[in-house]
Amino acid sequence: MSLLAVEGLSVHYGGVRAVRDVSFTVPAGEAVGVIGANGAGKTSTLKALLGLVPRTVTTMRYGDVDLARVRPHDMVRHGIGYVPEGRHVFVGLSVEKNLLLGAYARPWNAATRAGLDEVYELFPMLRDMRGRLAGALSGGQQQMLAIGRAMMSQPRLLLLDEPSMGLSPKLVEDILAVLQRLRRNGLSMLLVEQNAKLTFEATATCLVIENGAVVLAGTSQELQHDSRVRKIYLGL
């Protein structure tokens, strides 16, 4: 059963067509990856889902909700979490206040407090640094904070945009471990990444985007060994 179903999604910037008739589904409880070289249209696809860029779409269903009619700032109320490219944490606020802002659409009660404890259990480092300004954290720590902040809304679907960008190989492995754990817990995810290795290991199925269009789709295990993926990435 699909939690998210998208058909015929296109994005235009002036006369430039950045995304061309992209269609895909995210099954409930599954993780789907979107990979491609820099500038392929991955981030534009994700932002179009959220209504952050001009778009046209034939169908965009999230459960029984017509997502094309939902305003960007209401997405979180429908159970959609978003981890933006570049993290965008509130650098002048503490780690804990950043996390609490992730729950702004929910009433503060025992369940919300339990959600904070769950984030701290997922990222023990954030508990240790909960009083520290977010701007004092390293890039990897800020990425974990951005994921934790999104989890505070208790999403049914988590959208992640380039979570490995700018991170060391060790921190990329840490992020991978978190994504794999969330996947095992049954969280539906759409992961947009340039790092194909991370994506293949974190997701069940994957789309490969080139020049704004889906050129390959299949299981992550199959695509991991597909010579066409090497050609798209490396021109070989």
Image: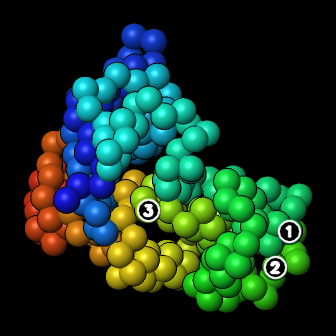
Which of the 4 quarters of the picture holds residue 171?
bottom right
Residue 184 shows in this picture:
yes
Which of the 4 quarters of the picture holds residue 100?
bottom right
Marks 2 and 3 close (CB-CB < 8 Å): no
Q: How many marks?
A: 3
Height in image: 113 above or below 14?
below
2 vs 3, front mark: 3
Q: Is residue 214 left or right of residue 159?
A: left
Residue projecting furthest to the top? 15
Residue type, mark 2 in image: Arg
Marks 2 and 1 close (CB-CB < 8 Å): yes
Residue type, mark 1 in image: Ser
Which of the 4 quarters of the picture holds residue 117?
bottom right
Q: Closest to the observer: 132 or 210?
A: 132
Circle 2 SS class? loop
Crowding near pointer 2: few (<14 within 10 Å), some, many (20+)? some
Reading the chain from its start, which is encountered first: label 2 or label 3?
2
The residue lying at 23 percent from left, 69 percent from top is 204
Quarter in which the N terminus is drawn: bottom left
Residue 10 numbered tag: none
- Residue 126 location in percent, x, y? 72, 81
The residue lying at 13 percent from left, 58 percent from top is 218
Q: Which residue is mark 1?
A: 94
- Residue 177 location in percent, x, y? 44, 83
3 vs 1, front mark: 3
Reading the chain from its start, which is encountered first: label 3 or label 1?
1
Residue 156 numbered tag: 3
Gap in angstroms between the C-alphas marked 2 and 1: 6 Å
Height in image: 159 above or below 31?
above
Q: Which residue is mark 2?
A: 130
Q: Is residue 56 left or right of residue 132?
A: left
Marks 3 and 1 close (CB-CB < 8 Å): no
